[in-house]
Image: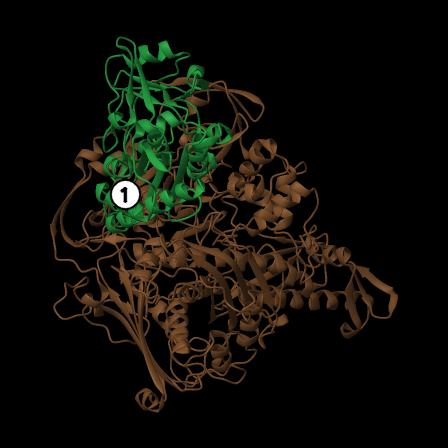
Amino acid sequence: MKKQTLSFTLNDQAESIEIAPRTRLLDALRVDLGLTGAKEGCGTGDCGSCTVLLDGKAVNSCMILALQAEGRDVTTIEGLGKPGSLHPIQQAMIRSGGIQCGFCTPGMVLSLKGLLDQNPRPDEAAVRVAISSNLCRCTGYSKILDAAKTVIDGRMPPGAADGNDGAVGSRMARTDALEKVTGRAVYAEDVQLPRMIYGALVRSPHAHAKLLSIDTSAARQLPGVKAIVTGRDVEMGYYGYEVRDQRVFALEKVRFVGEPIAAVAATTPDIAREAASKVKAEYEELPAVFDPEEALSMGAPLVHDDVNVYEFDWESERKGNLCYKIEIGEGDVDKGFEEADQVIEGSYETPEAHPGAIEPHSSTAMVDSSGRATIWTTTQKPFAFRSYLAAALKRPLSSFKIIPTHIGGGFGGKLFPCLEPYAVLLAERSGLPVQMTLTREEEMGATLLRHPSKVELKTGVKRDGALVAQRVRMLFNTGAFGPYGPNTAALASLMASGPYRIPNLEITGLIAYTNNVPNGSIRCPSGPQMAFAVETHLEKVARAVGMDGLAFRLKNAWEDGDTTCTGQALDAVSVKECLQKAADAVEWGEPRTPGVGKGLACNWWVSGTWGTQTLIETNEDGTFRLISGCVDMGTGGMTTSVLQMAADGLGVPVESIQLVRGDTDTLPWDHGHGGSRMVFTIARSAYEAAKNLKQQLLKEGADYLEASVDDMALENGQVFVRGDASHSMPLAKICYNRHKKHGGPMIGVSSVLDDAPATTKAHPIGGLPAPSFCAHAVELTADEETGEIAVTRYAAAHDVGKVINPTGCEGQVEGGVAMGLGLALMEELREVNGKVLNPSFADYLLLTAEDMPPLKTILVERPASEGPFGAKGVGEPPIAPPTGALANALAEAMDVNVERLPLTPEEVVSLIGARRS
Amino acid sequence: MINDFEFTQPRDVSEALEALAEKGRVMPVAGGTNVLVNMKRAPLETDLLVDLTRLEALEPILSDNGRIRLGAGVTFARLLEWRPGGAVEGLMGPMCVAFAGPLIRNLATVGGNLCDASAAADASPPLLALDACVELESATGGSRTLPLPAFFQGVRKTARRATELVTGIEFSKPEDDERWFYYKLGKRKADAISIVSIAMTVKLAGGKVERARIALGAVAPFAMRVPEAEGILQGEPLNDSTIAAAAATAARESRPIDDFRATGAYRRQMVEALVKRGLNEVARRGK
């Protein structure tokens, strides 16, 4: 192909390169010019992560051919501000907390610059419009709008992060904000290695078929192809989470549309995809099953011939397409229904949903001469990935070294291997480093999704509103494989009563295999599904007994001493406080205006835990290295709260603690980032390690000063005898002496693995440590004719136990509300015959800045009895209540019965058509 | 998967027309916001890509003797800043606000939007309601103009010949008392592909409809007028019964399909509701 010359101005410098005409401006910047600040989230102009300024105007660099920029002026994030001389927008983004995972940040900053250069004093509506093409999945846009306001007003908003005051409770800015806001942070696809080639997958076009043969000969003949691998060339083992039912390639049969059957590597991504399309497979189609009820019925096609051959950690009935079944209960439900004055039934459904990270999966692997693989990848669980890979490829754990890159949004979508095994196999066969990145279409069409649910509820209630009995049947469709199905059902069983006292409970959870795309463990797994079912249903129950939704909930809500369905006794219960505060924020008690609806929903959730180990090591100058194997998927807990608590435990300024970034060879083992565990588990471990190290420092000081360790203190960089300032020693000197004269650093260590709180009934998950509680309230109107919903007010009250970093906590709530509202209003992956119909950000919609309603975040502090400071998890719970709160507000506004999500305009119109009388 | 084509960037219209007349497969590209989406999904079926972004002659918006001419290369961002007043602004303004998002508006052109001829193309309904014509030029065939309904020929299919370039869009400036209505129904507030969009202009005289143009997007293979519904209104006053009849007729005339954005039934129901809403608003605005 003939190359053509592109001459243009790039970040104020004249630039001239030879490129193929097909090269997009984005590729020219990222690949040819090495400027990786512009990201590719979709490649179809729907996400804005590739935004650059073209002659001062913000545009998608994926929508322009590089040659179209001939003679023009292009500004990328690298040209905007550098560390030390940041643009005011960049400063404001750091200080306001407008950055979480950071993947959208360069584009967001440039869109704001494009606006402010044209109009230095836009109102908030204009700012929302200007960033409405830039999708952010983390922040809910609130803090980005704060940042814009900061710049427009020329001053800090009240309470914004001011420098790195790292005290517990302060708004310390995240320590990785600078590299993210300047576009320097390295994400998985930014990794570039010498001689690197690119991989692509060959995927099944059938939902269920025998795989008769694979012919790779035509693909092999394509110039540039370096390696091809199929399931027949590899020794494969089964891998998974609770259940090991999956192999990296389909072998005898394919079980879902998109299941990998082969992988190809070539010198360019285009050739790799071309070669993948030339791999020919012969199939014999089999009857398929897509509906989970049908899958569990007699005579349904079997997705797996015998589910009992797979290793499984939990006890369960398993047969046919039943992947997992959980049953738990309390009292006598039938007797409870007899005692009840009314018994209300309902059935509620939620669709398949995507985690929606803007960064697609990407992995790069290199295999050394001993056969050991190094893998740069976007993962929430680097250590677990070693063991998944070891099982999948039947090799020792030590064969894999995982280098976690920055994660451009996780949300549970990066808890399980995606491209890693294929990249390793291709790197091995080609002898070259191999990078693989999913297209947005593959990302939406064939990665782990949120389980669709069908929840049936039957509830008995007394005339006075007291709940007496509830039977719940929950059915989740896990698709062709069940890596996280059992976990989802087990968590759902805990949520089936909501945070309410119900003396008689009967809960059944079922996970069905089908020939759909497999589902995973997406942020707050089962939470939004259960909050929708339980909270929508209980509102119906409240209406049946003529009670106000708030009064009904306050009557039945848990209090200290109440027990969950597993018999776990609860303390630090704050449901009522959250309910009251959220309700007050939308003026719940005020008389209703016709057509305006208000809705409430609450939820409870787990805080962590799983094991981790943190080390804090002295440097010879009296500063410290904090070493943890936990990655930060973008929430920022690692780069704020963990450091804040470590600094508090040591009694040193937070700036003196450096967070070590490493890999699975060098860092201590950790379970991974998920389960709302960053503060509760990791920061706690850091705090304990800090206290442990402080004790060692005091001891060292005491020995030098010939004092008792009990009399020692550490303040202002000095270790001294309390009450005797003349007996002191600089921290730096203690560390120096130790390093140079006494054999190396001092290391504080802490391993955390909580014993789960006691339960009276057996349950695979058991007691939940430090449960958190929350309540959301919403006000909305809906267009009677078109069904469009306008959310006019939203309040979210969250009990976080203790606020370690307010900016971080608010960011989790705001971003979680945005995600929950998306699930309530617009997010739905539609599969027909196992094929996803809308695998793009054009048709799988996330909330934009214009859709985000005014939000009031209320942080409640009811400290947990466990751990220092009493902090509880906040990462996951905010996404659960919006589904129920929206449904309840709509039910009130339009007098309808909501039974499924999302509440698209069409769904609302159909509800109005079937209006309850 | 492999896109292999040459690229040329003509400096003026005649150079562009010559390029389009070259042998082999030739494809023009303007803002690129459709062409590059297509290119991401499958190789472009072209040997030569002709970039139109340097054709200054396609950029002006002219108003002369009661005629308005939009250069085909006018971007939606530029259209959004345009303040022609009256029905033109009343239709084009909100259409531009609802068109994709600001990043795409900075690139996409009105000519490109019409040539892509998506059923849901946002520019089509307002321009149909303004009775616009498309100007086409070619190196050998001179120029011709086609009314929009004749320009649209099928799903992403137009009357443009491969050697032709759409250079402008022309329509008569409506009189000051022309009334209008615009609505785009999508699944979210910004950057949504329309489920249904509607644009109408209505001229009333003596309390009766002298002329109504009602245009619909996303409810047929390409944007359409609803001549029967318009005919029902002709010479009639706007009252509950004429409005209801026109709305029901428009719904019948629409040919929506089921897709994951909406069912055909809902789209048809929305055509009726929005035509009714529009005509009611038009009637109210006169009082």
Residue B169 % position (x, y): 36, 22
Q: Amino acid at mark 1?
A: Ala
The residue tagged 1 is B246
> Which of the two residues, B142 or A500, is positioned nearer the viewer here?
B142
Q: Is residue B261 or residue A845 the one in the foreground? A: B261
Residue B135 sits in quarter: top left
Quadrant containing the C terminus of chain B in the rendered view: top left
- Residue B265 x %, y %: 24, 51
Q: Which chain is green?
A: B
Answer with left or right where residue A262 lies relative to residue A282. Answer: right
Name the residue rendered at 20%, 36% in the picture.
A278
Whether residue A591 can be seen here: yes
Front residue of A573 and A345: A345
Asked whether, in this view, residue B118 is left or right of residue A298, the answer is: right
Does residue A429 appear to the left or right of A30 in the view shown? left
Q: Is residue A41 above or below residue A637?
A: above
Q: Which chain is brown?
A: A
